[in-house]
Image: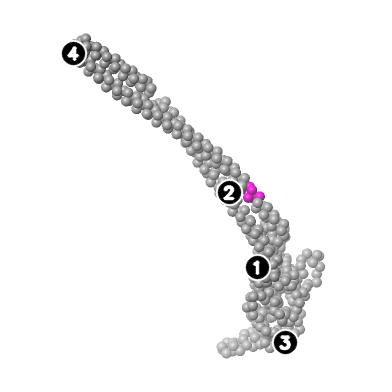
Amino acid sequence: MVAPFKMTLATQEVLRSLVAEPAKEFYGLEIGQLVGLPSGTIHPILARLEGAGWLVSRWEEVDTQTEGRPRRRYYSLTPDGLELARDALAVIHAKRSGKTRLLGRPEAAGGVT
Amino acid sequence: MRLRTGCDWDDEDEFIDPADEAEHQEREQIMRYQALVASSRARAAAAAGAATAVARAATTAAEQARAARIAETVVERALANRSPVVSYADVIAALDGTARAGRIAARATRNINGGSDTEAAKAMIRAAAQLADDVSLVDFASLAVRVDQRIGGSVNMAFKTAQAAATAASTAAFLASRLSLEADQYDSELTAALQVVAVSGIVSADAVLGHPSPTSMTRTKQSSIARQVTDLIAVRLLPPQHRERYAEEWAAEIGALADGGRSRTAQVTYALGLSVHAVPLRVELSRPQRRRTPR
């Protein structure tokens, strides 16, 4: 399956992080730190994935007065998004593996489960 | 699930929103504050430079006054110790000599009329010699008077120089005082400008000055500048319906950085990164096929 948007390397890294822990919710800064992306680059990717329906976001349920800080926005994969992300990453992995075999190099380790 | 078209960020015509007048007005206001602060700074610096120059001129004037007083003393000593030849007594003696020569000449004439030719001739020779001596004395006396005049002129000039130097020193002191007052006034203007900026609530003084103010340094761990960057730049680059959401989301992230012990510089850097990438985010949020709501 082809992704409905440009699957940049940064987007792939974000999806890999989310797919690795599908039940967990992350906020933007957390994802950026996990992936190692510069600040700001994560939000357009999250917006793109959310706009495509792969991600869903919600506000953190805390009392801002008690906590003394604003609410965080948590992101998580939708069930469809999880399936589509796995498929897309698998396709990319397969393409890379094919190119690697054509070049006569051993297949790269890892991939998408 | 229906797949959507690919992502391209080329539609830059969506970036500028002419209807967003408030954003432009606030930017212009910040620019005006920054210009006001820069102007006050420049004028204070110019006043300080001028005060320094005037102080230097005052020092020079004082030195000139001292030099003039020394010159005056030297001239007075020269007058007191000048040669006896050029004294007034010499001039009087020369005049007396001339009168004496005249009397000798009259006596010689009488001798010529009543005496022998030899005695008359001798008397005339003596009178002529005496006149020659007297004439030389008179010339010398006039020279002495001219020398006196020159010395008097030098004394007058020394007095005038001293007077001018004293006036210059006084003027310089006055100018220095006035410029010092102006510098104080510019300082007051600068303070007032910063207060206006602070009261406006649009941007903090440290954001205008480009460095953290003492109050922001002691307030909290969280950088106010980072918050200002996100609120004033990053958030305002987004479509209006998404601003509230991202303002809170990014504020929470900067707060998380502060809670994690990250420096203010790191927080500001993070905020700047958000601002830089607010444009592609705006493009993503402006896509018509988006199905989610902002909140």
Overall secondary structure of the magenta stretch? helix
Q: Relative to residue B159, is residue B239 drawn left or right?
A: right
* Residue B69: image location, x then y, percent: 48, 33
The answer to which of B295 and A104 lies nearer the viewer is B295
Q: Are marks 3 and 2 in contact (CB under 8 Å)?
A: no
Q: Earlier in the sequence, mark 1 or mark 3?
A: 3
* Residue B145: image location, x then y, percent: 37, 26
Q: Are marks 1 and 2 in contact (CB under 8 Å)?
A: no
Q: Estimate the spatial distance between the alpha carbons at disc 1 and disc 2, rounded to whole Å.
A: 37 Å
Amino acid type at image mark 3: Arg
What range of the chain is rendered magenta?
B183-188
Amino acid type at image mark 2: Ala
Determine the residue located farthest toward the top in the rendered image: B114
**Label 1 element class:** helix
Q: Chain of mark 3?
A: B
Q: Estimate the spatial distance between the alpha carbons at disc 1 and disc 4, rounded to whole Å.
A: 127 Å
